[in-house]
Amino acid sequence: MNRKHFLSALATTAGLTTFPALTRLQQAAAALPLHEERLLIPPYLKPGDLIGITCPAGHITLEEIKPAIRIMESWGFKIRVGNTVNRADFSFGGTDKERQQDMQTMLDDPSIKAIMCARGGYGSARIVDQLDFSHFIQQPKWVIGFSDVTVLHCHINRLYGIATLHSKMCNSFPDDYNKAEPIVQQTISSIKDALIGQQLHYTTFSDSRNRTGSTKGILIGGNLSMIQSVLATNSEPDTIGKILFLEEVGEYLYSLDRMLNSLQRAHKLDNLAGLIIGGFNRIKPDDPGEEFGRTVYDIVMEKVKDTTYPVCFGFPVGHQKDNYALKCGIMHQLQVSKEEVQLHELRG
């Protein structure tokens, strides 16, 4: 790889047992706090499996998702385009009802083995409470996306303990994969690796400001503003004993402090196993005379100063080219040393 802070992204063949459906006992266990649940992994995909594409948030055209369709078909998968693609209700991919119905159809259809969210934006939180997951928990499938889709990751992870895939979406696929930058090829390939059941391992250069240590825990997280927005809802993440990863884009420093302060006040940072800070990109400049006077590093470390778990900065996840696939709801090991950071998916 030619990105200086990224050393390697390796995958080895998976060996974790998946499940075809949840038993009544497992369904009852879904009501437990997540740190008491068993891990539930949707079946990994095989050639010929069907991936549905839908727009739970912002709108996108069929033309814009054609590169993603071509690439996923080249992986051996079949694609079904949902009714919300090509629809628009101002910034949304259709009305709330249309987006809810399209997602519901894909959750309920047993022939669809994974749901790729076409893009982020805003809108998932407006429909998540209207979704019926009763068929989904009987026949789980991978829900894929990031940014606004963090709401779905949090909701599914907290209420049902089912793994989801945090990754790039259709609007991030290159027009020509073969001509794309290596980092773009690698991040897109990481989606395929995750979906077919390869065990994901990532190694990055260590930031001098990291707090070293080694830990294990279920990996959860996503976009900071989305996680802050679901506090005090039934989608609120249980962070006890978890490895939490966070990313954000296009915010003022004081806004980042405010959102992290909300997590701190809600005690979401108190009992983590570890904290991963991904890309905090395109930070808005302070207004003249209203300088906040703190860096992202200062803000984060102030919030976790009374804890001892490992913390790393600059992990390759977020609104950036090096946004690698991460399996939420699955046990990982995080090792932060002075030389490097390693995040390994564990098999139970």
Image (tube, helix red, strand yellow):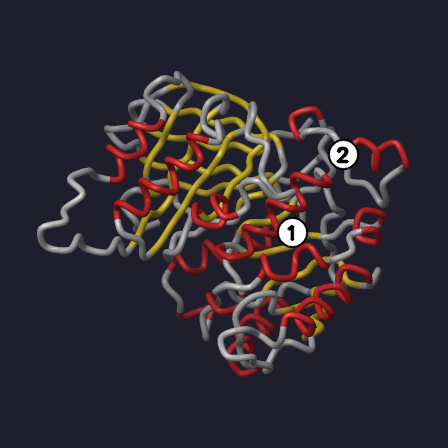
| 24 shown above or below 120 | above
Q: What residue do we see at 83% from left, 51% from top?
A: 134
Image-based side of 111 in relation to 175, left or right: right
Callout 2: few (<14), some (14-19), or many (20+) C-alpha neighbours within 10 Å? some
Instruction: Give the residue pinned by disc 1.
Output: 195
Label 2's element? Answer: loop
Across and down, in percent, residue 167 comes to: 52, 53
Across and down, in percent, residue 254 comes to: 27, 45
First reached walking from the N terminus: tag 2 or tag 1: 2
- Specify the quadrant of the image occupied by residue 118: bottom right
Across and down, in percent, residue 311 comes to: 37, 27
Q: What residue do we see at 18% from left, 43% from top?
A: 292
Looking at the rendered image, the disc whose residue lies closer to the viewer, 2 or 1, is 2
| 66 shown above or below 107 | below
Q: What residue type is labelled 2?
A: Ala
- The C terminus - image quarter: top right
Across and down, in percent, residue 310 comes to: 40, 23
* 132 or 265: nearer the viewer: 265
Determine which of the numbered discs, if any, sits on residue 31 in the image. Answer: 2
* 264 or 101: nearer the viewer: 264
Callout 1: few (<14), some (14-19), or many (20+) C-alpha neighbours within 10 Å? many
| 130 shown above or below 213 | below
Image-based side of 76 in relation to 219, left or right: right
* 144 or 347: nearer the viewer: 144
Q: What residue type is labelled 1?
A: Leu
- Which residue of the protein is positioned furthest toward the right in this rendering? 24
Label 1's element? Answer: helix
As measured in the structure, the alpha-carbon distance from the residue carrying label 2 to the one carrying label 1 is 26 Å
